[in-house]
Image (cartoon, rainbow, N blue to C red):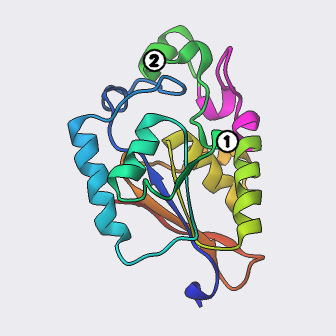
Amino acid sequence: MSNAYPQIHLVRHGETAWSLSGQHTGRTDMPLTPVGEAAARGVADRLEGLSFSAVWSSPSQRAYNTSVLAGFGAQSVKKDDLQEWDYGAYEGLTTKQILAERPGWNVFRDGCPKGEMAADVGARADRIIAGLREANAGILVFSSAHFLRVLAARWIGLPPEGGALLVLDTASTSVLGYEHDLSEPVIRKWNQK
C-alpha cells in the first residue's frame, strides 16, 4: 500500500564547517567540507533505484552541491522557499553563545531577531507542501536541517514549532508519504544514514 501513493524524499545537505562547529547557518552560503562532499556522494547509494518526477533544491550551495554530488544535479531545480531558516542577528553563532546572552532561548519558540520566526518558516514550508501535493508524484528535496524539520512537522499537521521534536543529521535522508490514503500524511522514515 505504501507504493500506491507518492513519497517525498528529503535530503539534508552534507557537512559544512559551520554545521560541524554548531554555528547557525541560515543565509551564509557555506561550501561543503571534503567529508560533506563524500557523504553527499554516499546519498546516491541510498537513493539508487528510485525515480523522481522532480528534484527540488534550496539555492544554497551546500544543498545544491549535495544534489549534484548525489547524482541529481541535471534535474535539480532551485526553489527559494527551500532556504534554511533566516537566523538574522544569530547567524554564525552557536546555541551556547546565544544562550549566554538570552537564557532559555529556543529557535522554534522564540525565532531570531532581524530574522524569521517559526511562523515565517512554516509559511514557506506550506507553499512547498502545496506544490508537492499538487504534483502528486515522487519528488526529491534537498535543503537544510531546521527548514526540513519544519516541513516535516507541517506535512503531518503539526504547527511549525513541532519541528523541534525532529532532529536531522547532515547527509541524512527521510521520507514523507501517506498511510492509507492522501488524507493521512505520515513520516515514513526519518534521519536515515
Q: Which residues are magenta?
A: 106-122
Q: Position of residue 96 (x, y in %)?
A: 42, 19
Q: Is residue 187 above or below residue 180?
A: above
Counting every numbered tag in the picture gives: 2
Q: Is residue 157 visible?
A: no
Q: Is residue 155 left or right of residue 35?
A: right
Q: Position of residue 103 (x, y in %)?
A: 55, 16
Give SS at disc 2.
loop
Q: Position of residue 41 (x, y in %)?
A: 27, 54
Q: Is residue 102 visible?
A: yes
Q: Which residue is mark 1?
A: 81
Crowd band around label 1 with a 10 angstrom C-alpha radius: few (<14), some (14–19), many (20+): some
Q: Is residue 176 magenta?
A: no
Give the spatial CA distance, label 2 vs label 1.
21 Å
Residue 11: image quadrant is: bottom left
Q: Is residue 158 left or right of residue 98?
A: right
Q: Is residue 139 above or below residue 33?
A: below
Q: Is residue 66 left or right of residue 78?
A: left
Which residue shows up at 46% across the image and 23% down it? 95
Which residue shows up at 48% across the image and 75% down it? 51
Crowd band around label 2 with a 10 angstrom C-alpha radius: few (<14), some (14–19), many (20+): some
Q: Which residue is mark 2?
A: 92
